[in-house]
Image (cartoon, rainbow, N blue to C red):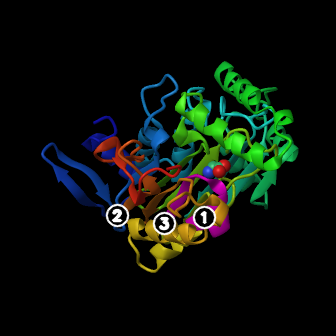
């Protein structure tokens, strides 16, 4: 197990974190592997891509974050180092460099970060030209008295902070996918708005079925949340947002309470999937409030999914009268209890999420509110 601490590393980690009277949590046959103080069991949770991409390295997002966090690094810094791997990896077409562009072929990125122990937050929306928007969001948190900077001004802010600005964050793959989408949906062919809407939806489904777009990544995003042995809770969400979006469209990811919410006394929640459904319900905030009332992360997540389902407008219902989209939440409380919940999971497309704790990085099945596929 790569991420397990040996006794020497543990002593170092404990020292770095200023641990005094730690007590063993889990004793495996190999000996004690993790200790905790203040009743918190260290864990990192993320969307499934958090245990998928390595950008040529040897560790995933959650493995990197967990290792750094348990060596004493600030939890938010550790989580951001984890998601940077995905932001920089051109193979993930839903986050950072190589994320699927907007309808004009421009990659626009959203990100938010929240630091529970110090009650600080920062975010950027619709930023272009910076591969790692999570690091810009962190600078908003650290260097300004604000929580959100958007568009060209977010890029100007990043430039002033010394970030490299690039002309174009498309890769060959994302550009080819966009050109194919343009070819199939040429709006001049659909003057009747209703017909155009149906045609667009049909093209989206076809392009997913043909492998141009990963169905789990149509709305993109990685969310990653963690808690260390001190009970420090933090979170980060970063995305290229909805594929082929109207330029300037901002989803849930950079909005505190929607794509991410952290309360240092309670826990953290964040999301992937249809951002508009989450924005309307501020579901990450709702989940953290559920945990504040004593709900387990899974029950708090289910409560939010039920709220989203109840608030879904008729045009977004499928033939069964259920939501025609998916949305997922990754939840951890201050004790280190965690859950991944999803509106839908099916035999064909079982939704999984990433976890790393003393047992190492892995994917676990998310708990679904509904069985089946949204489009059926
Ligand atoms: N959840 C990501 C988005 O809707 O932009």
Foreground label between 2 and 3: 3
Q: Are marks 1 and 2 in contact (CB under 8 Å)?
A: no
Question: In the orientation shown, which residue stands out farthest toward the left?
Answer: 29
* Residue toward you, 195 or 117: 195
290 in the magenta segment: no
Give the magenta-colored segment's residue range. 268-284
Q: Secondary structure at mark 3?
A: strand
Query: Mark 2 highlights which residue?
Result: 37
Foreground label between 3 and 1: 3
Tell me how far mark 3 sits from mark 1, CA to CA.
Answer: 14 Å
Q: Residue at x 78, y 31 (%)?
A: 105
**Mark earlier in primary sequence (1, 2):** 2
Q: Residues within 10 Å of mark 3 (few under 14, many from 20)?
A: many
Give x and y (percent) for residue 318: 55, 57
* Residue toward you, 319 or 259: 319
Q: Residue at x 52, y 46 (%)?
A: 79
Q: Residue at x 53, y 32 (%)?
A: 209
Q: Residue at x 76, y 45 (%)?
A: 195
Q: Secondary structure at mark 1?
A: loop
Tell me how far mark 2 sits from mark 3, CA to CA.
Answer: 16 Å
Tell me how far mark 1 sits from mark 2, CA to CA.
Answer: 19 Å
Quadrant housing residue 217: top right
**Mark earlier in primary sequence (3, 1):** 1
Query: Mark 3 highlights which residue?
Result: 267
* Residue toward you, 16 or 127: 127
Give x and y (percent) for residue 372: 42, 52
Number of the label disc, if any, that sits on residue 118 = 1
């Amino acid at each position: 197990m790569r991420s397990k601490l040996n006794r020497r590393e543990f002593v170092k980690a404990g020292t770095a974190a200023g641990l005094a009277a730690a007590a063993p949590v889990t004793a495996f046959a190999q000996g004690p592997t993790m200790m905790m103080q203040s009743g918190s069991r260290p864990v990192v949770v993320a969307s499934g891509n958090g245990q998928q991409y390595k950008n040529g390295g040897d560790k995933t997002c959650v493995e990197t974050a967990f290792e750094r966090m348990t060596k004493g690094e600030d939890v938010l810094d550790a989580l951001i180092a984890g998601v940077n791997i995905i932001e920089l990896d051109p193979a993930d077409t839903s986050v950072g460099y190589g994320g699927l562009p907007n309808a004009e072929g421009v990659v626009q990125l959203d990100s938010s970060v929240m630091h529970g122990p110090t009650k600080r937050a920062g975010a950027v929306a619709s930023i272009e030209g910076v591969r790692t928007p999570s690091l810009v969001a962190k600078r908003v948190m650290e260097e300004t008295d604000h929580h959100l900077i958007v568009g060209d001004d977010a890029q100007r802010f990043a430039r002033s902070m010394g970030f490299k600005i690039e002309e174009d964050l498309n890769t060959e793959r994302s550009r080819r996918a966009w050109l194919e989408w343009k070819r199939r949906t040429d709006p001049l062919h659909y003057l009747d708005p209703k017909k155009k809407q149906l045609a667009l939806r049909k093209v989206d489904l076809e392009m997913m079925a043909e492998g141009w777009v990963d169905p789990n990544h149509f709305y993109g995003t990685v969310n990653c949340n963690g808690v260390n042995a001190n009970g420090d809770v933090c979170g980060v969400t970063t995305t290229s947002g909805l594929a082929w979006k109207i330029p300037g469209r901002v989803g849930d990811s950079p909005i505190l309470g929607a794509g991410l919410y952290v309360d240092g006394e309670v826990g953290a929640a964040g999301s992937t999937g249809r951002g508009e459904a989450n924005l309307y319900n501020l579901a990450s905030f709702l989940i953290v409030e559920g945990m504040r009332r004593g709900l387990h992360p899974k029950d708090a997540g289910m409560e939010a999914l039920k709220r989203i389902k109840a608030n879904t407008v008729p045009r977004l219902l499928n033939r069964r009268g259920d939501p025609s989209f998916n949305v997922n939440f990754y939840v951890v409380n201050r004790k280190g209890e965690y859950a991944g919940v999803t509106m839908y999971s099916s035999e064909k497309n079982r939704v999984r999420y990433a976890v790393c704790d003393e047992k190492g990085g892995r994917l676990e099945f998310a708990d679904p509110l509904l069985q089946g596929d949204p489009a059926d």
